[in-house]
Image: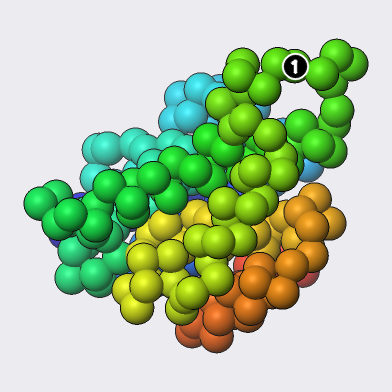
Amino acid sequence: MAKLTLYHAAPSRSSITRWMLEEVGEPYDIHLLSLDKGDNRAPEYLAVNPMGKVPALKHGDVVITEAAAICAYLADEFPRAKLNVPIGDPRRGVYLKWLFFGPGCIEPAMTDRAFPRKEEPRRAMLGYGDFDTVIDVLTKAVTKGPYLMGEQFTAADVIIGSTLRWGTMFKLLPERPEFAAYVGRLAQRPALQRAEAQDKELAAA
Ligand SMILES: N[C@@H](CCC(=O)N[C@@H](CS)C(=O)NCC(=O)O)C(=O)O
């Protein structure tokens, strides 16, 4: 099997993909980078990800960047883990919507709120519309549970769940009981617990 290598810094957005790799359950290597030391700006790493950002994943000769793309890729590449909704399944549209909603709507809504613009942009110009709508849509999505797609845990939960965990931890998202309950359910997952414990060790080293 082609080797999987995660270009990783702990803690960072690459922790999202470490959680996903733990869910997939295939062996992988970690190539650790120090963002503080600027390893992500070194020419060797820019050859892997010209954005100078983590995560990046190498699978054999294939390089994938962007956390959500990596999670979607892994879910499709290793279907035995049942973390995707396959082509042909009518639920796939909703599954893809959530994979894109994380980086496309929640993240920019959160960062715009944290770093407000000098001029209020027109709602129609913003891909996410407005912060309150994003939060309301998200609240409704996680209310029924246990996961976004119902009983099936998918890569979309890794993306949306990580953003919610991170956003609520840093108080970039409002506290809502629905968010707390969903994040609590995710925290029970052994793969997330393993990824977190391993990242804690790395961060302390
Ligand atoms: N859009 C990227 C964002 C990745 C990102 O911003 N990573 C941060 C760590 S959380 C990073 O590499 N920062 C280092 C830098 O920009 O110098 C993704 O979703 O993978």
Q: Residue at x 57, y 38 (%)?
A: 105
Disc 1, SS: loop
Is residue 35 visible in the rendered image? The answer is no
Residue 133: give x, y in percent of width and height.
65, 43
Residue 140: give x, y in percent of width and height.
55, 61
Task: State left or right for residue 102 relative to residue 200.
Answer: left
Task: State left or right for residue 178 relative to residue 56.
Answer: right
Q: Residue at x 54, y 76 (%)?
A: 186
Cβ at disc 1 under 8 Å from ligand 1: no
Q: Residue at x 76, y 54 (%)?
A: 173
- Furthest toward the right, the residue is 118
Image quadrant in which the N terminus is located = bottom left
Is residue 146 visible in the rendered image? The answer is yes
Task: State left or right for residue 19 relative to residue 12.
Answer: left
Residue 165: give x, y in percent of width and height.
67, 63
Residue named by callout 1: 121
Image quadrant in which the C terminus is located = bottom right
Q: Nearer the viewer, residue 176 or 51?
A: 176
For the image shown, how many numbered marks are present on the structure? 1
Above or below, 84 against 93 in this view is below
How has the structure been colored for display?
rainbow
Above or below, 127 against 53 in this view is above
Q: In the rendered structure, which amino acid carries the disc numbered 1? A: Pro
Q: Nearer the viewer, residue 156 or 121?
A: 121
Residue 30: give x, y in percent of width and height.
48, 57
Q: Nearer the viewer, residue 140 or 87?
A: 140
- Furthest toward the left, the residue is 88
Dot 1 alpha-carbon crowd within 10 angstroms: few under 14, some 14 to 19, many 20 or more: few
Q: Residue at x 18, y 70 (%)?
A: 80
Above or below, 42 against 29 in this view is above
